[in-house]
Image (cartoon, rainbow, N blue to C red):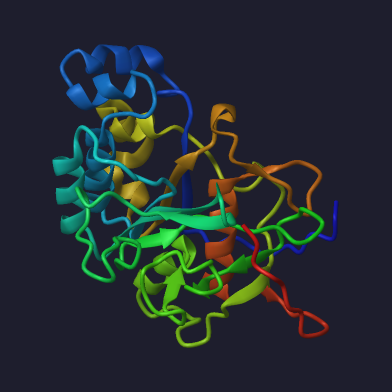
Amino acid sequence: MRHAAHGPGDPRLVLRGIDRPTSADEIVAEDAKSDPVLGALRGRFPWSRRVWAALIERLGNACAQAIVLDLVFGAENEGDAKLRAALEKFGDRVVIGSNLSPVETDRGTLSQLLPPSTSLLPAKNYETTALDHRVGYVNIWPDDDGIFRRARFRATNHELGDVVNGPPNLVLESLDARVLSKLPHPKFRGSLPSFARIRFVGPPGMVLEMPSVGDVLTPKLWDANYAKGEFFKGKIVLIGPTANLFQDFHRTPFRRDMVGPEIHLNIINAGLSNRFVRESSNRTSALTL
């Protein structure tokens, strides 16, 4: 273990993994014959955006406190009308991702921001959807030794490489900051740091369950395992890629790597309970992409 800082997990946190279609394939196969959303779920990834719309609708109607998609819908795609409607209907509780990535140009390595498609959200501010209150950047940055310990909740446009056609001091917020801002009466309001070392809930995969999204969308499993949605009432539900094929694994202070969605839940947990590690000195860290 590489100096891991632990803290208790908030009981509201739930992680849904994008992995196999379901824990009971035969049930989904039966229901998929009459349900186009479940039929799409059994196809290749990326799925129709009808899947994400149905997931938001189901969790929203079950009174989930926040619905977080650790995904970037960067281009127009099938099912956008349904997803756009769901984002509008549950916009006070839903957050989706944007992503920063390095791009090689004749001027060297520059930063590029991939925001959600305008087929999903309006580009009202500086001609980008990245500043919408339902969007936050999904990136996490490791320390110089390649280990993730610190969360960057917000950064200026200049710090990120002037990725938005706007002023240098324009502030962009992370996925986690956006989620925390939507919760009622959070403890941290007015004091969430821009950059802080977090306390992890526990080792990778040992604390937060990672069942499949297919379980939520399958009527029989929804009724049997989640009491027709009662399980999700008041919960913060994060949906993100957990399968090996997505290669979203990161080094942490633990011996095993942690999937990106689980890291985001650890960051949200730290923000919920203000469980940050107090540094012994003022540490500055350059943001590199």
Instruction: Report x, y in % for residue 206.
Output: 67, 43
Residue closer to the observer: 10 or 35: 35
Residue 3 shows in this picture: yes
Viewer-closest of 21 and 120: 120
Q: Is residue 215 above or below residue 198?
A: above
Q: Quadrant of residue 71?
A: top left
Q: Residue furthest bottom?
A: 190
Q: Is residue 275 visible?
A: no
Identified at 62% across, 75% down, the residue is 195
The image position of residue 212, as x and y in percent, is 44, 32
| Residue 193 percent across, percent down from the top left | 57, 80
**Residue drawn at point x = 73 percent, y = 78 percent:** 284
Position of the C terminus by quadrant: bottom right
Instruction: State which quadrant residue 107 falls in.
Output: bottom right
When asked about the image quadrant of residue 47, the answer is top left
* Residue 161 drawn at (x, y percent): 53, 67
All told, the count of numbered labels is: 0
280 or 154: nearer the viewer: 154
Position of residue 278 in the picture relative to residue 233 (left or right):
right
Query: Who's the residue at 25% across and 29% down the image?
Result: 219
The residue lying at 26 percent from left, 56 percent from top is 63
User: Would you say 33 lies left or right of 27 here?
Assistant: left
Whether 149 is drawn above or below 192: the answer is above
